[in-house]
Image (cartoon, rainbow, N blue to C red):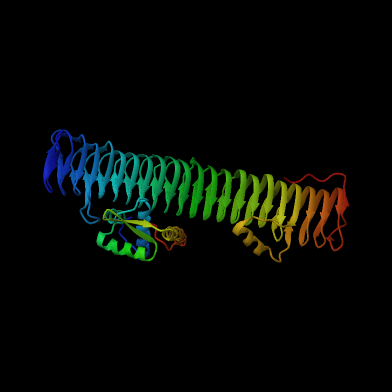
Amino acid sequence: MGGRNSKRSKTELYAEILEVITHYPEGARITRLSYGVGVPVDRLKALAERLCSYGLAKKSTNEDEVYYGVTPRGLEFLDIYFRMRGFLEEFGEGRSG
Amino acid sequence: MSDSAVGAGTTAKLGKIEGELKVGRGARIIPESGRRVVVTEGAYFEGPATLDCDFECKSMRVEGRGWGPGGDFVIRGALTIHGSADINASVRADGEVVSQDLDIAGHLQSGSVTSKGLRVGGHLTTRGSLRAEMVDVGGHMSITDDVDIAGLRVGGHAQIGGGKISGEIKVRGHFTTKKPLTYGQIQVYGHLRLPAGSTGEQIVALGKVELDGDTTCKVIEINGVGKVRGNCKADNLKVNGKFETTGGLRVSDKLEVNGSAETKKELECGRLFVGGRLMAGSIVATGQADVAGEIWTEHGLKAKAVRIGTGSRINGPIVGETVEVGTGIDLGGFWAHATNLRSIGRMTRVDDVWGREVDINRYSQAKRVYADVVRMKSGSIADEVNYTKDVDVPDHTHVGKPPKKVERLPEPPI
């Protein structure tokens, strides 16, 4: 969900990375993710690694290519995040962009 | 069949290529004559390029090194791909995009899009219509004209001109449509806004829902806040949050209110379950009404059988063939627990009651009771009891006036 003008918080970035990964059920390569999220590959790699260390994303390798997927805990996080964002926007605290 | 190649950073004039085309990074392609460049086989791009023409090919692949400035794949015309396209870049096309299966890692900004399958990792912005089977967008989606889609999944917000989405619609952010939409099953986390004349199968809203004008939808589940500016017609309606309609509400099968629902006018339904609070001008249920919460009506509640749970409140007359006041009602799941907690230590209070058989149980209070048969339990209270056949008023029952046997009961108010 890149291309936005305002600076995204770390939580927003994590959610956006995970959300874009869910659109690749076959697994997402880091370059592909980079375009979807709008973050350069080197920075995205570090963020994706952190998501894996939190147990929200998982890594798999196929013919030397690294693919990222979302874990059940990651899906749970996304569900809670988007529900909470809906509430915060209702309260006038979230951002809708 | 001859394959052609265009070097990186060069400009090439092309017409019709019989065979495959390989294009280097940062190349520019211009048409030899007219506006169109045709490649009869696949077109392979080593990186972003600029196509100053309408471009047609059998399949397309664009390699990319990841997001960064100046990395867009630009088409200053229409793009037609007879097979599939795998594009590792953001795409900007001035004209229409037609493909069998389009997979874009970044954003897509174009005229109308027609593709059996469409996946966009970033935002999809279309100045025109969208025709596709499955549309999968990681970011936001904005389609100025109408859509004809079988299934839609959007990670951000979605805005469309109207049209038809026949299958599942899942939007993480807000979903708005300018013109009426015929939809399948909508699940929206953010704000959902549909104009008058929209019809569909199912709405599951986790955020705020605004339906402008008269609305028809088979299944509606409101978990956030829902507002219908007009009449609302559904087969099943479940309210776990707050729901309001300015017109009438017609639910042909089951209406379940665990949160709060309000309609200014008449409410008609098949079966009624109220675990929260329901307010209406009048309520007519053709089946059973189970109440474990509060109902407020101006003209009354009428159902075939009315069961009012312990600790519940009903303001406005009640009419039913059988009416039981102060009974145990199990709404099941989380709501059963919530309503049970709420009813602890509370009297069941109802207004006037009309019925063939009326039971007033322990710790229950009714105003006037009109029935053929009235059974009161010890510890119940009624201001007045009028009956035609039989009455049972045991000890420790409080009745304001002695029960009165009448030839005929007065007409119920509803």
- Total marks shown come to 0
Q: Quadrant of residue B19?
A: top left
The residue sitting at 41% across, 60% down in the picture is: A74
In the image as oriented, which residue stretches furthest toward the front?
A63
Question: The C terminus of chain B lies in which quarter of the figure?
Answer: top right
Task: Pinpoint residue B173: horizontal percent, then vertical percent.
Answer: 42, 54
Q: Position of residue B28 (x, y in %)?
A: 15, 44
Residue B95 in view: yes
Q: Nearer the viewer, residue B351 or B152?
A: B152
Residue A85 as seen in the image, left or right of residue B41: right
Q: Quadrant of residue B285?
A: top right
Q: Residue at x 66, y 54 (%)?
A: B296
Is B248 situated left or right of B131 in this image? right
The quadrant where residue B79 appears: top left
Q: Which x, y percent locates residue B276?
A: 62, 57
Q: Where's residue B287, x and y in %?
A: 68, 44
Image-based side of B406 in relation to B277, left or right? right
Please indicate whether residue B318 sits to the left or right of residue B156 in the image.
Answer: right
Q: Please identify the quadrant where the N terminus of chain B is shown.
A: top left
Above or below for A30 versus B219: below
| Closer-to-camera residue (B109/B6) | B6
Say which of A45 and A81 sits in front: A45
Q: Is residue A40 visible?
A: no
